[in-house]
Image (tube, grey):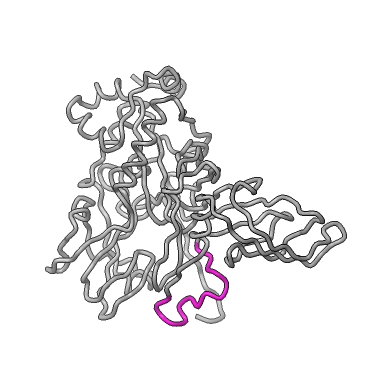
Amino acid sequence: MAKTYNEINEKIASGKAVVLTAEEVIDYVERKGVAAAAKEVDVVTTATFGPMCSSGCFLNFGHSAPKIRISEAWISDVPVYCGIAAVDVYLGATQLRHNDPANMYFPGEFRYGGGHVIEELVAGKKLQLFALSYGTDDYPRREVRTMFDINDLNQAIMTNPRNCYQNYNVAVNSSGKRIYTYLGILEPNMKNMTYCSAGQLSPLLNDPLYKTIGVGTSVWLAGSRGLVYAEGTQHCSAVERGANDVPVEGAGTLALTGNMKEMIPEFVRGVSLPGYGVSLALGVGIPIPVLNEEILRYTTVRDRDIIGCAIDYSHDYPEKTCKVLARYSYEELRSGQVELHGKKVAVSAMSSYHKALKIAELLKSEIQRGDFMLSEPSRLLPLNQSMTGLTITGGAK
């Protein structure tokens, strides 16, 4: 028997909703069977925690007296984008601090950048704003230097173009030298391997064909009541999938937004990636309504049923050869060791399953208390969308 969003929300409001995490629902359905469990379970909570580079925030400072139309600005020496309204700026998670030597003395340390500023904002720390302007008749002030914290801002809106990748590469290095990547440090001669996914807890792996997650879906964004505002950039759903419809490579993505003033500092952390840059580790939880048996069945996906592709980041990834060295289940990856070309390889995660599970539990509790309601998407994510690359015509190669 099918359920509706309204019916599930009514049960949430009355305190009668049955809510399970994506980890709990696996054994529950195994014991009860899909048909019986689909009648009983109303919501499954999914979650992930890890670096999400395509993140950032819009900040509004309000007007000084006299007014300024900011044309250049830095927060704690990190440049922000000012090509919008007078006292609005956008801060990107991967923006480097002014005069950071980057990889001039390789590998760079990247101690501080946009992700760290966002972490400190959410934590309520005082930061310095330095802003310049060319001056106009209606905005005559040419310079501002002041201290502020998140409570001094009119708005602090996290606006992330690409989060929650649906599956992703497993990185390894076959070359004879150490390399530095956004998936961490990869030792030479395939001595280690890294991945970044919450596996069976991850939102889009529990809704592989986007039956419930779409534009307008309510999400738990680092503790705030956020939402999906669009498909994420590089959303590429037309990929190889297993018999369970789960993609074996990077596929769907989500564009998310939420109020930073409501966020929990534990789930917003700046990241330094030696030899690569800075980023932001972010916690996201998404509730999946159990509308029918099919949707419930998808939420019972196990790590052993999710496959990741091992890619050589010393050559095949940067050169875009599309070559896959091997495939592993997330159960194998989480064991800490796999075999590649007859050699034992240590495996580690850039993401935190522990924190993802904590988020799924927090979201479960909020729903059970009636503090988090579900929202039906106004538009589902595109299912057969491919992604084009950049064609370089003329100029330097």
Looking at this view, name the residue that lies furthest to the right. Answer: 137
Judged left or right of residue 175, residue 15 is right
Q: Measuring 56% from the left and 80% from the top, which residue is drawn there?
A: 395
Q: How many marks?
A: 0
Using the image as rendered, state which of residue 66 and residue 330 is in the foreground.
66
Q: Measuring 78% from the left and 65% from the top, which residue is drawn there?
A: 142
Residue 105 colored in magenta in the image: yes
Q: Residue 359 occupies which quadrant of the picture?
A: top left
Q: Is residue 362 above or below residue 266?
A: above
Magenta span of residues: 94-108
Provide residue 334's location: percent of width, then percent of height: 22, 53
Provide residue 90's location: percent of width, then percent of height: 61, 57
Q: Measuring 52% from the left and 73% from the top, which residue is drawn there?
A: 392
Q: Is residue 102 above or below residue 123?
A: below
Provide residue 280's location: percent of width, then percent of height: 45, 57
Q: Residue 82 occupies which quadrant of the picture?
A: bottom right
Q: Is residue 172 above or below residue 375?
A: below
Position of the N terminus by quadrant = top left
Looking at this view, name the residue that lies furthest to the left. Answer: 342
Provide residue 38's location: percent of width, then percent of height: 29, 24
Judged left or right of residue 199, residue 4 is right
Residue 117 colored in magenta in the image: no
Judged left or right of residue 44, residue 63 is right
Q: Decide whether the magenta segment is chiefly helix, strand or loop.
A: loop
Using the image as rendered, state which of residue 126 and residue 182 is in the foreground.
126
